[in-house]
Image (cartoon, rainbow, N blue to C red):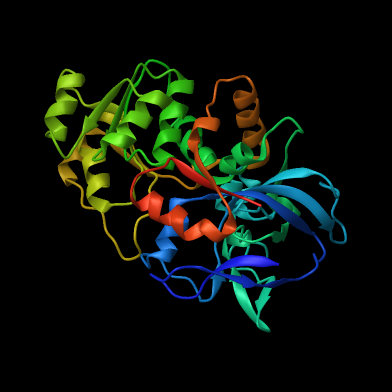
Amino acid sequence: MKAAVLQEANKPLTIEDVDIIDPRAGEVLVRTSCSGVCHSDLHFVDGSWQLPMSCVLGHEAAGVVEAIGEGVTYVKPGDRVIMSFRPFCGKCYYCLGGRPNLCNDPEIGAASASRLTWNGSPILQFASVGSFAEMMVTSENGLVKIPEEMPMAEAALIGCGVMTGVGAALYTANVPGGSTVAVIGCGGIGLNIIQGCRIAGAANIIAIDIMDSKLEMASQFGATHTINSKEVDLDEAIKEITKGEGVEYAFEAIGVPAAATQAFNITRAGGTTVVVGMHPLGSEISLPGPAFLQEKKLIGCMYGSTRFREHMPKLIDLFLQDRLDLTSLVSRRLKLEDVNEAFRSMKAGEVARSVIEF
């Protein structure tokens, strides 16, 4: 099969012929229909996070079941599915506690044995998905079935960016109606945090970025206020909008420590800061210690705190009811051979999401 292979950080991906194994017991072979190109993938392309090389990236995908391994009961060939990059084991401390997004079972997770070989040697299948390829093999516990009326490109985005962003608002922060919130970083994740806050009924949604093009998209997805923090003093702008109080919920969606500090600083007393961005390995976030006497809360977020078999179908329902905009997120539709262009346009801030169609 054809796959885009990352051989070295800060080098273009190359299209290669890669072999994939037949599904083992409990596994499913999926023919890739669409794959989003996510900023998390870029972290490994640019070297801010490291992976064993070579590898097939991509983790935000939808496709059609091609074959199933022994014992698989959840899906059958022909079923349409979304891939989850956090398959669950169903038996660990986190799964039993209702937090399968934190499942760390090494037998099925991102560190599980590779199902791919290239030139006779194993290569990494990123996050148990590896969707920059024509086929994928994963655990049946990493799939969600979707209805026929759900378009594949939009379905793929639910697999990461939409679930993470909307989930951060609805399930991690539990934003209540009438709230005042701020979102720092209006890329794919940030836009979906904005959508989640809108769905939750937030009264004031303040979008913050340094690129006007992203702020324009933020307004389209539900932001009531926009701030270009490169042009104005962020703290003063927030004080003006909130009458000096700060926001009740602040979300950091970039993965930059200074932005997380900013988010905490604009959060009012008793408020909550949610760090959603994927921060570089070895990075640290600096916070003013006395601010915790104001009962400010700082929390992390993994995959929007999702129980994805429960939550992803709800997002599909919202989309089909025209209450969640997924179509406008698809800025460009590309072929696998254009994957490097997708990363370039992402870094340039030209897109909400590029989608690779197979």
* Picture residue at 18% right of the left edge, 39% below the top: 291
Q: Name the spot of residue 289 as percent of width and height, x first.
A: 18, 46
Instruction: Judge from the rendering whether residue 130 lies leftward or rightward of residue 267; answer left or right.
Output: right
Q: Nearer the viewer, residue 300 or 115?
A: 115
Task: Identify the image quadrant of the N terminus.
Answer: bottom right
Q: Quadrant of residue 118?
A: bottom right
* Picture residue at 21% right of the left edge, 41% below the top: 262
**Number of numbered discs overlaid on the protein picture:** 0
* Picture residue at 46% right of the left edge, 38% below the top: 165
Q: Name the spot of residue 70 as percent of width and height, x first.
A: 88, 61
Q: Is residue 83 visible?
A: no
Q: Nearer the viewer, residue 343 or 90?
A: 343
Instruction: Judge from the rendering whether residue 120 lies leftward or rightward of residue 218; answer left or right.
Output: right
Q: Name the spot of residue 45 as percent of width and height, x first.
A: 43, 65
Residue at far bottom of view: 120
Q: Quadrant of residue 27?
A: bottom right
Q: Nearer the viewer, residue 356 or 174?
A: 356
Is residue 9 placed above or below 298 in the rendered structure? Answer: below
Q: Name the spot of residue 243 as percent of width and height, x first.
A: 16, 17
Is residue 204 placed above or below 232 in the rendered structure? Answer: above
Q: Is residue 305 visible?
A: yes
Is residue 230 placed above or below 67 in the rendered structure? Answer: above
* Picture residue at 46% right of the left edge, 37% below the top: 168
